[in-house]
Image (cartoon, grey):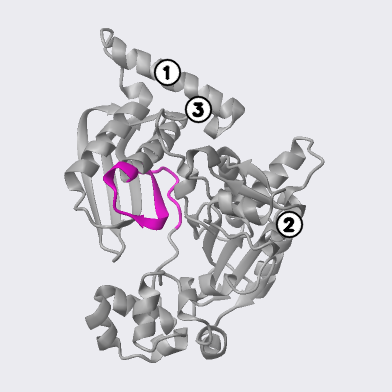
Amino acid sequence: MERQILHVDVNNAFLSWTAISMLKKGSNLDIRTIPAIIGGDESKRRGIVLAKSPIAKELGIKTAEPIYFAKQKCPDLQIFPSDFTIYRHYSNLLYQLLLEYTEKVERFSIDECFLDMTDYLGNRTIFDVAKEISQRVKKEFGFTVNIGIATNKLLAKMASDFQKPDKIHTLFPQEIPTKMWVLPVSELFMVGKKTIPKLERMGIRTIGDLAKQDKTILIHKFGKFGKVMWEYANGIDASEVISQEEEPKGIGNSITLPKDIQNIEELSEVLLALSEQVAFRLRKQNKRAYVVNVQLKTKDFVSYSHQKKLEVPTDSTKTIGNVAKALLQESYKGEPIRLIGVRVDNLCSKKEIQLSLFDTNKEKQEKLDQTIDKLKEKYGYNTITIAGKMNLNDRIRFK
């Protein structure tokens, strides 16, 4: 029996969720109806467009371009800060709704999920379920989603990226030649900007061209990634939908960078931002961690990691950040990095560990973290950040 997979992707998540939050707080302005963007801190010269309204898109504003250029295109452009507390809230609402349909729900990112409906359809069709999910999300939460229907995760994701917004698309194996092979090779999942010129020099301009290329040639040229590209171009993907564990064994955050970074100072700043989020989530769950792990993925999709076991478990932002930075310095090989992450493992309950009565520095740090957490919960996640830390929003994975 062929699998029945859905990919649910929130349309313009950051801007939509910000708009809904503002409206619920009494605002008369729906920022989805004006030239508006969600952006980083323009004053730090790293300010870039994270999300844009439909009108802003019509004016030529592009995701990931500097806010400075965006404002040149539209002087009246309204800029709103990102708020990951709000985003996590709506992401969780969506996740809980999807769990009503199947136990097999995988969070692929903050604004997209895979569902394996193979054993959960009953007397309904996959189309019935997709339509119901789409209608419920719009009615209950106020935002829209695109849904892809297919027999594997890759095809479902490709389908959901067809015409937007608020659409349901299929991409079954028999539809690959007419729906997927005609697309530019740049539209294929995992094919990055630096790979495209190399493929074009081989005469490969469409996904169909890639699918018909000799696999051994691709492997010789691109290594293991060549095999992955060929399989994806032919709609081959055997990966399972991995449901979230109820009790996490670890907590982590990772970011696919909008462009490769080769500067260790910039990478350190990203790590500090990620460490702050990880530590915040640890404290929210009343957990501490014995292990800090730094994960890196190069532009060639080679992954490696480095970890350290602590003598005393921690939930301290400062400690996790310092350890992560030291691990980066020990492990970084100098190549361009595409993805970077921080993860803590071997969690224990906070109640299991007591601070030494004489450890005043840790007590002070703990009180500081608690104070900052309260301010973040009351006024928003970005209210206070680590001094000198780069704006994490400038490194987020763009949609």
Callouts 2 and 1 close, C-beta under 8 Å: no
Q: Earlier in the sequence, mark 2 or mark 3?
A: 2
Residue to which mark 2 is pinned: 138
Cα separation between marks 2 and 1: 40 Å
Taking the image as shown, residue 345 lies to the left or right of residue 383, namely left
Q: Earlier in the sequence, mark 2 or mark 1?
A: 2
- Point out the residue furthest to the right here: 28
| Secondary structure found at label 2 | helix
Q: Is residue 339 above or below residue 84?
A: below
Q: Quadrant of residue 87?
A: top right
Cα separation between marks 1 and 3: 12 Å
Inspect the image, locate mark 1, and give the three-letter code of the amino acid beneath it.
Answer: Leu
Location of residue 205 in the rendering, given as x and y in whole percent from the top left corner: 44, 85
Q: Which mark is residue 368?
A: 1
Q: Which mark is residue 384?
A: 3
Judging depth in this view, the residue of 398 and 168 nearest the camera is 398
- Membership of 211 in magenta stretch: no
Range of the magenta residues? 243-266
Q: Can you see residue 112?
A: yes
Q: Can you see residue 125?
A: no
Cα separation between marks 2 and 3: 33 Å
Callouts 2 and 3 close, C-beta under 8 Å: no
Location of residue 343 in the rendering, given as x and y in whole percent from the top left corner: 33, 43
Quadrant containing the C terminus is: bottom right
Taking the image as shown, residue 55 lies to the left or right of residue 311, namely right
